[in-house]
Image: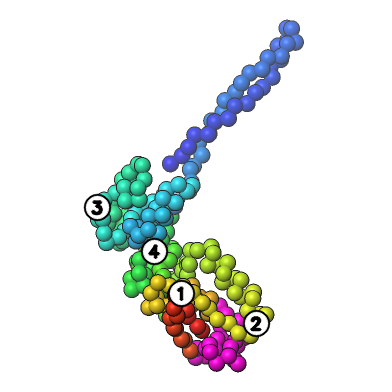
Amino acid sequence: MASLSCQVHSTNLLNSKNANSRRKRLISCSAQPTQNNIKVVINGATKEIGKAAVVAVTKARGMEVAGAVDTCHIGEDIGKICGMEELLEIPIINDLTMILGSISQSKAAGVVVDFTDPSSVYDNVKQATAFGMKSIVYVPRIKLDTVAALSAFCEKASMGVLVAPTLSIGSILLQQAAISASFHYSNVEIVESRANANDLPSADANQIANNLSNLGQIYNREDPSTDVLGSSPRRWNSCTQHGPSRTSF
């Protein structure tokens, strides 16, 4: 596909009889190739974060929604599910391979954004890699073993994958603040609120604990009320107090 680019130039012409100059406009046109949009496949499209991704990609330059995959609302237009004013004419299907094959045949650049679950994310990335497409993964409570397996697989396949532990800017800033503060203290305790104690520790708390453990320091040596952080193996203790839930590392 090519676009037509036109420019207007002004040129002075000299009349030999009266030495008066006249200005003439010249228009030159040239065909230039257009940059193809990146095809984005949203896996887990009917989740709240999936719908937000569909809207964001639709509004972004240089990319477009090429497929919506999920196990519910099959056959419905993803634009309607997202509450958009105009339909995207993209039906929700539960076959990731079909969409990947279609994009691969068009030889367009594509990426899969995965919002599914820890049990299926590895196979999803393998499918995307088989069709030459990179993956972006945001799956809460994904296990470190799965991340390590994804890393090894993609390195062997020479294909990149981004595993995002969180999409919250506030959480990332908190992690950085915890690392900066940890150099000035010998005791560390992570406290968080959750409606259900079974949700403890959260993925964000795990990430903060892992970051601090990798600094090469040992915390809580002399505090018997909390667990040692930074040693191996690490001991975990979760308790629920009256009101907010609390987790000690």
Residue 244, numbered label: 1
Q: Element at badge 1? A: loop
Q: Earlier in the sequence, mark 1 or mark 4?
A: 4
Q: How many marks?
A: 4
> Quick one: 199 or 229, which is closer to the camera?
199
Q: Amino acid at mark 1?
A: Pro
Residue at 66% x, 17% y: name it: 23
Going by the picture, which residue comes out furthest to the top? 17
User: Where is residue 133, by image quadrant?
Assistant: bottom left
| Mark 4: secondary structure | strand
Q: In the rendered structure, are the residues bearing label 4 and label 2 in contact, judged by CB atoms less than 8 Å apart?
A: no
Q: Tell me, yes or no, whether the two marked residues, 1 and 4, touch with CB atoms within 8 Å.
A: no
- Identify residue for label 3: 75
User: Nearer the observer, disc 3 or disc 1?
Assistant: 1
Secondary structure mostly seen in magenta is loop
Q: Earlier in the sequence, mark 4 or mark 2?
A: 4
Q: Which corner quadrant of the image does residue 18 belong to?
A: top right
